Image (cartoon, rainbow, N blue to C red):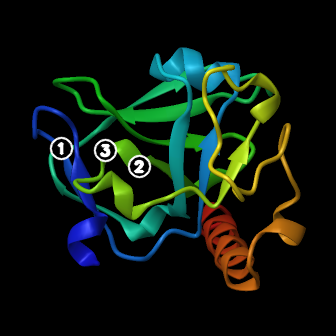
Amino acid sequence: MADDLTGGCSCGAVRYRLTQPPIFVHCCHCTWCQRETGSAFVINILIEADAVETVKGAPIPISTPTASGKPQSISRCPDCHVALWSTYGGSGPAIRFVRAGTLDNPSSAPPDIHIFTASKVSWVDLPEGATAVLEFYDYETTWPAESFARRAAARAGNASRETR
């Protein structure tokens, strides 16, 4: 599994590895993700920021607007500009949204849920039995207890670091 949790940009200047399995994986079909990726959707691995280990290079954060009005910070390779992960104003810096397509084996991170399917492009068919919601959802009622606990612990740890 460790090999499945390594990735990087297109040019190889930035490499990373995930030291934990994903907390949860979103396949987002919102129009903002469509525009930002130039694709029909994006698959984001939600994971603790300290579980993303940069092993080569240093991505640069770029602030971009979001529909919520709280900017996201997209970490990109400084050379080829591939988006590797994001942090969102609403989630805070403790959780990263790693682009599953940048994994060496993107198939190792199938989505747990499809979100914002109300704006899904018409020619994308969701897999039979896939969990899907028209917009967003409640973490507490959707995530497994372990995932919710990991998110809460990461956010609490980050909050205590911010107050020091």
Q: Residue furthest bottom?
A: 146
Residue name at image x 36 percent, y 57 percent: 107
Tell me residue 124's x, y (percent): 60, 29
Instruction: Determine whether label 1 and label 3 are within 8 Å by CB.
Output: no
Q: Which residue is mark 3?
A: 102
Label 2 sits on what residue type?
Ala
Instruction: Determine whether label 1 and label 2 are within 8 Å by CB.
Output: no
Q: Which residue is mark 1?
A: 14
Residue 46 lies, with reference to residue 22, above or below; the image says above
Q: Residue furthest front?
A: 128
Distance (Cα) linking label 2 and label 3: 5 Å
Disc number placed over residue 100 in the picture, else none: 2
Residue 13 lies, with reference to residue 139, above or below; the image says above
Nearest to the eye among marks 1 and 2: give it: 2
Task: Point out the tag, 1 or 3, that comes first from the N-terminus.
Answer: 1
Residue 129 in the figure: left or right of residue 162: right
Distance (Cα) linking label 1 and label 3: 11 Å
* Corner quadrant of residue 75: top left
Nearest to the eye among marks 1 and 3: give it: 3
Label 3 sits on what residue type?
Thr
In this rendered view, identify the residue nearer to me: 144 or 134.
134
Instruction: Determine whether label 2 and label 3 are within 8 Å by CB.
Output: yes
Residue 161 lies, with reference to residue 29, above or below; the image says below
Instruction: Tell me how many marks there are.
Output: 3
Judged from the image, the secondary structure of the residue bearing numbered disc 2 is helix
Q: Residues within 10 Å of mark 2 (few under 14, many from 20)?
A: many
Tell me residue 11's x, y (percent): 11, 32
Q: Quadrant of the C terminus?
A: bottom right
Judged from the image, the secondary structure of the residue bearing numbered disc 3 is helix
Distance (Cα) linking label 1 and label 2: 15 Å
Label 1 sits on what residue type?
Val
Task: Point out the tag, 1 or 2, that comes first from the N-terminus.
Answer: 1
